[in-house]
Image (spheres, helix red, strand yellow):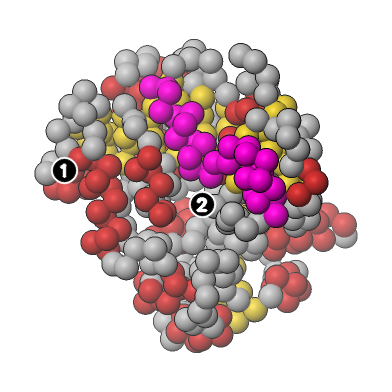
Amino acid sequence: MTSKKYFFIGIKGVGVVNIATLYKEWGHEVSGSDTDEHFFTDDVLSRLSIPVVSFDPVYITADISGVIRSSAYGDTHPQVARALELHIPVLTYSEALAEIFNKHKGIIVTGTHGKTTSTAMLGRIFEDAGLDPTVVVGGAVVEWGKTARAGKSEWMIAEGDEYQAKILSLRPYIVLLTNIEYDHPDFYKDEEAYREVFSILLRSLPESAYVVAHKALESFIEKETSAHVVYFQDDPTLELELWGVHNRVNASGALAVARVLGVQEDVARKALEHFRGTKRRMELYTSKDAPVVVVDDYAHHPTEIRATLSALRAEYPDRHIVAVFQPHTYSRTQALADDFTQAFQDADEVLLLDIYGSARETEKLISGEQFAARVALVHAHTRYAQSIQSTVTYCRAIVSPAVIVALGAGNVWEVARDLTIQSEAH
């Protein structure tokens, strides 16, 4: 393969960094731009020696073979505009992913919950089975220290994002469908519209393809596809390092795909048993036996919050559990507010931060204070903590033995980081 030069705009985004990682590991020259704000992907980029510069258009030069941009940046962005002026091909992350994926024998892992963990699990199984897959995950895999793996075989495994119907540009051989539950109300007006994207995906599959899906989806799937269908359920014989029934269900789905492809059972099970998880998915910031255990989790949907808190309660039945939740997007917070109020039953105390809005949202449909008031009607020990700093200050005074879990898709992980840094400094 001839080495080329690629530039990535918004390179710290988890999707964009995936493609940057693949291009870098396939021998291309890679650089990119982003803000100065620190993300977990900074560590990935540093480890791969990928330079990150500002959004100054001076970095877009005529010798660049292609530009890949985050969907957050349109044609008026100075670097995108400069690339177009120089007639350099510009692709969005989704377009770049499809271009790579559709040249492989591809597996997409999609659904509302469990995509990142299931994709990473499947990637580790394939790796240990000697299948040398290319893998794209929506979070950093602990064992890899990165979000993607550039393989040399025909196989590619990718997390399939249903948001904005992005999965429909991918042509998979196998679809692993974890579950379907209404989400992304800023894009899908109702549950019917949300489910339709999965219907379209299933209907597009050829008869030679496979759908591996949770048994609970049987009535939905049977009428939507002519592909081979294999169902899975929670396999109680699986032993994992990860906590929670939901993670065992994720592993059961990955194992079902491995069986479809004839991967040796003992190889697949061993990979799952030793799988250490991904960043921001029940990630421990302390030892699991610390006086105050600090955990960070990406849970931003009521079902995900319930699953995480249930797993922590099972692991720490007698500890004081503090849930620190940062709602993600005004549209989701308003649309699912009633479900959110019921999601914290396994927490002894709930601290709520202000809503982490999306750049795509133009209207603040509900305030953090209003949301906290609604949760407080159901959960008596609810506090509107508002900011990261005030939350950290409050949490530092919590008496052990306790568990503090940061929940949300925004920057709430900074609570876990700051608590850990400050506790280590004392």
Residue at numbered disc 2: 315
Tell me which numbered mark, 2 or 1, is placed earlier along the sequence: 1
Q: CA distance from mark 2 to mark 1?
A: 39 Å
Note whether 101 is above or below 334 in the view shown: above
**Was residue 294 drawn as part of the magenta stretch in this picture?**
no
Q: Left or right: where does residue 68 sit relative to residue 167? A: right
Q: Residues within 10 Å of mark 2 (few under 14, many from 20)?
A: few
Whether 84 is drawn above or below 174: the answer is below
Question: Which kind of residue does numbered mark 1 sit on?
Answer: Glu
Q: Position of residue 401 (x, y in %)?
A: 65, 62
Residue at horizontal 78 percent and vertical 55 percent from the top: 36
- Name the image quarter holding the C terminus: bottom right
Quarter where residue 409 is shown: bottom right
Name the one closer to the observer, 133 or 21.
21
**In what quadrant of the picture does the N terminus appear?**
top right
Q: Is residue 42 left or right of residue 191?
A: right
User: Which region shows up in magenta?
Assistant: 78-105
Q: What x and y, as percent, mark residue 34? A: 72, 51
Is residue 101 shown left or right of residue 403?
left
- State the residue position of label 1: 224
What's the amino acid at mark 2? Glu
Determine which of the numbered discs, if any, sits on residue 1 in the image: none
Residue at 63%, 21% (x, y): give it: 26
- Residue 236 seen in the current view: no
The residue at 64%/49% (across/down) is 80
Most foreground residue, 372 or 36: 36
> In the figure, residue 234 lies in which quadrant?
top left
Q: Main secondary structure of the magenta part?
A: helix
Q: Is residue 88 magenta?
A: yes
Name the residue located 82 percent from the left edge and 61 percent from the top edge.
Answer: 422
In terms of secondary structure, where does tag 1 sit? Answer: loop
